[in-house]
Amino acid sequence: MGDRIEKERVSVAYGDIGDFFEERSARDGVKSKYNYVLFQDDNPELAEKRDAWEKEKIAPYLSVGAGKSALDLGCGIGRWGEFFLPRGVRYVGMDGSAGMVRRGEENLAEYPDKKLFQGYLQDFTRRLAEEGIEGPFDNILVNGVFMYLNDDDFQSSLHSLLKYAAPSCTIYLKESMGESERLTLRKVQSEALKQEYTAIYRSVEEYRKAFKEALLSQCECLASGPLFEEGRNRKETLDYFFVYRRLAE
């Protein structure tokens, strides 16, 4: 059955999350490549629509063109590489799942100007150094990863982002959030996914406060709100985004 915990601040086991994504990445014969990371296993058309809706909504805020760069922390199969690489942007993607990195390499095989590697968000500064990757970046994306981090790791990784942000860098943060309060799932069986699922759905206000404390001394918030105006199929949680722009020096 697993644990379903409302409001209380509790931790999750990273091994459970790692097992979940390695199992997903090992699947063959998925109906859409976006099912690997956007789920909706029984509705691949919705996964594809959500990918398109998200890119259409966020693209106007991003810095693109020759000489620009993007750091995608939690890159999955490289969905955002599909956006950046054809536009001449150097793309660096990191994901906690080695299997997802392999899927990303396959998905982005036609593009040479990319770097994909395995690494955990709570340890991303060390992993970037080990891979010989230096900032700053013109775009930083964290897309559905904070929800898999316990509170201390969430805070530390969030506060490290600006170390890699160029002046006028766009920082795009998107998570599944609790609409009104925190909800934690620990190895709860999902009938839709056919897997046990673990995640922390922090509330929208909790994220808003954390992002304000970590970023607003050097950034302005350009936009925030529910990511999808349609296609929402969960009652307690929603996909919510924030876009920040680092102030020019």
Image (spheres, rainbow, N blue to C red):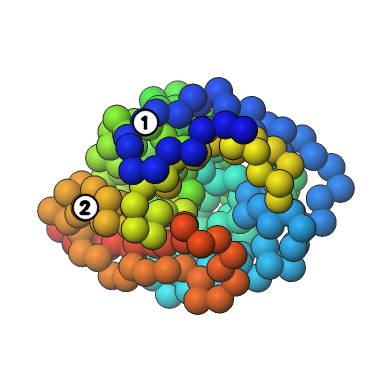
Q: Nearer the viewer, residue 139 or 87?
A: 139
Residue drawn at the location 34% of the way across and 52% of the way down: 181
Amino acid bearing label 2: Lys
Residue drawn at the location 32% of the way across and 35% of the way down: 9
| Residue 8 placement, left or right of 116 | left
Q: Is residue 114 above or below residue 132?
A: below
Query: Helix, strand or loop at disc 1?
Result: loop
Position in image of residue 54 (x %, y %): 53, 68
Farthest right residue in view? 29
Position in image of residue 182 (x %, y %): 36, 47
Amino acid bearing label 1: Val
Position in image of residue 65 (x %, y %): 47, 66
Q: Quadrant of residue 224?
A: bottom left
Task: Give the residue number, with chain letter if any, for mark 1.
Answer: 10
Query: Helix, strand or loop at disc 2?
Result: helix
Q: Is residue 160 above or below residue 43?
A: above
Alpha carbons under labels 2 and 1: distance apart = 19 Å
Q: Earlier in the sequence, mark 2 or mark 1?
A: 1
Q: Quadrant of residue 88?
A: bottom right
Position in image of residue 118 (x %, y %): 56, 31
Q: Nearer the viewer, residue 203 or 245?
A: 203
Assess disc 2: are there few (<14), some (14-19) or many (≥20) residues with their C-alpha within 10 Å of its C-alpha.
Answer: few
- Asked whether the viewer can see residue 170, the reply is no
Residue drawn at the location 41% of the way across and 54% of the way down: 177
